[in-house]
Amino acid sequence: MTEKFTYEALPMRVVFEVGAIGRLADELEHLGLGKVLVLSTPGHRGLGDRAADLLGSRSVGVFSGAKMHVPAATARAATQAATDAGADSCVAIGGGSTIGLGKAIALETGLPIVAVPTTYAGSEMTPVWGMTADGRKTTGRDRKVLPHSVVYDPELTIGLSQEVSATSGLNAMAHAMEALYAPDRSPITSLMAEEGVRSLAQALPRVVSNPGDIAARAAALRGAWLCGACLGATTMGLHHKLCHVLGGTFDLPHAATHAVVLPHVAAFMLETEPEAAAALERALGAPPAHGFAALARRLGVPRSLAQLGLREGDLNDVIGQVSAGAYPGQRTVTDDRLRKILLGALHGADVGE
Ligand code: NAD
């Protein structure tokens, strides 16, 4: 088939350097922003305070209430804090949960965000927001939540646990996999996806065996950037839909859920996507479902959804939600096949062997 695509580059500034956090104030200066509310999780309040110190008089405070899956009540409280402080912008320093909170504020108020990611989840590169209310996670796309600048500092990821390093890295690889078969993929997103997976697949085992290896940390963060950029430019499919339902309704940990589900969805989706499968095979050095499963095993991440707290009795609800609210990029899947995929992930069955 002759190639046909539409590609629109997102306006995005990226600063990548070991020690880049030291340039945070310059970055705000460059963007003309001077009343910054810093966001962090309660556990990383110290990181939030450090960013506020670096911003000096440009900081109007730290809101350290970020939580996983962005509960609507947390988003309201943070938006109120930004308004009360008279903020003209937010710096979100942390993983996808903290950056997600920045996006929720931007969605409501239009305030620009600068993201300083400290995991490999990739949210900083996307105009995708997510929020959870009444046990349902809603996601959407809006240009105003796309960070105006992203400061990548591999040094900030040195303290990231082996487990979160591995699971958030596999989360990023899932973005790239879905970008490779997305209906709106293009040559540029496919190049980024393949290189992002290659970079992470090579770096993560080194990160896990030696968390202080700054070169490996930088390579993993570079991969996360590329994979996040793919997610930002393409439509999500079955894998992300499944993980959003599992996280939103059953409160399963986001990145670990991605890590468990990835080889199982890969085996199904790539049956009909030979070009995507070939790109992933080049990047992983093995057929993709097997390659993802082998990498996950090597990294020692959880292998089953049961380990994360899902029960077999929950599957009907998952299947119902996935079928009723299909994402635009989703390949049609029968309920029976979906149950088979989910049972494999639930019990940690071998895949692609
Ligand atoms: P997270 O932000 O919850 O962080 C995971 C864990 O890592 C937390 O315990 C955190 O305290 C710890 N951590 C973070 N940075 C650390 C550091 N530098 N050192 C030590 N520990 C650190 O999880 P995540 O996997 O980064 O992100 C998951 C969230 O992001 C989910 O809500 C998901 O939906 C969202 N997400 C959104 C997008 C998007 O495009 N909108 C993309 C990916 C993920």
Image: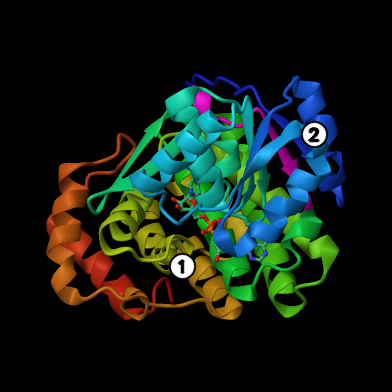
Nearer mark to the viewer, of 1 and 2: 2
Q: Disc 2 marks which amino acid?
A: Ser
Q: Find the magenta span and give its range.
A: 142-153
Residue matched to label 2: 57
Is residue 262 shown above or below 195? below
- Residue 206 position, x and y percent, is 74, 72
- Residue 15 position, x and y percent, is 79, 37
Q: Disc 1 marks which amino acid?
A: Ala
Residue matched to label 1: 256
Label 2: element kind:
helix
Which quarter of the figure has residue 26? top right
User: Reading the chain from its start, which is encountered first: label 1 or label 2?
Assistant: 2
Q: Residues within 10 Å of mark 2 (few under 14, many from 20)?
A: few
Residue plotted at (47% across, 21% down): 4
Which quarter of the figure has residue 249? bottom left
Q: Is residue 145 magenta?
A: yes
Nearest the camera: 8 or 332?
8
Nearest the camera: 347 or 134?
134
